[in-house]
Amino acid sequence: MNRQPYVDDLLQSVERAVPALLALGDETSRRRADPRKWSPCEVIGHLIDSASNNHQRFVRAQFQEDLVFPGYDQDAWVRVQRYADVPWQELVTLRAAFNRHIAHVMEAVPADTRNRRRPRHNLRELAWVPPPNDELATLDYFMSDYVGHLRHHLRQILDTSEHAWLVDGMTGDLGSQK
């Protein structure tokens, strides 16, 4: 089975980010740079929510003909779970473990399932970078987009710290910022 480059990017992003994230500590991880934006705790919480929702989508996509999935209110999920009240190490550890499992799931998807072009989808609403209007969607595109989304948020946290070089050293395209 040929492993897709985004699987390696995901695993590399997880492993390289863990020590840098842990180095931020509880106090720094709870600070908001702007009152209208999430703190690092909340960003990592959002990545946990994204992992939870997308894990289900990646599994379900193997049993259905379309790529139509429910969305979720990201701000509400972060708010009600009160991520700023959870110990930083627990959040970082959970995010890392969940994403290692998602990499395993991604790697296990057969190529014909990953690359099957699906005319019915709602990735224009769900994807971090929606597919072009004139293209049929694939699970492969959606999984790669997931990794881009994760790396975008790691950059938000780590670009503002002394660990920015970790994000810059990751392979692959980070895509446009949303």
Image: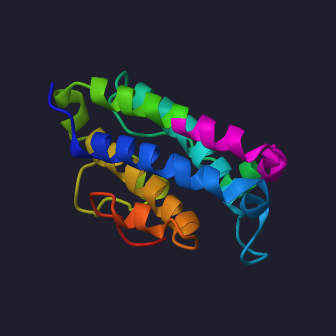
Q: Quadrant of residue 25?
A: bottom right
Q: Is residue 81 above or below residue 61?
A: below
Q: Is residue 12 above or below residue 62?
A: below
What's the image's color scheme? rainbow
Q: In the figure, is residue 20 to the left or right of 39?
A: left
Q: Is residue 153 above or below residue 70?
A: below
The residue nearer to you, when weighing 108 against 158, is: 158
Q: Quadrant of the N terminus?
A: top left
Identified at 38% across, 33% down, the residue is 103
What's drawn in magenta, residue-wise? 79-96
Q: Main secondary structure of the magenta part?
A: helix
Residue 162, image x and y in percent? 54, 70
Residue 52, image x and y in percent? 57, 35
Identified at 80% across, 53% down, the residue is 84
Residue 56, image x and y in percent? 50, 30
Identified at 46% across, 63% down, the residue is 152
Tell whether position 29 is magenta.
no
The answer to whether residue 85 of the structure is visible from this angle is: yes
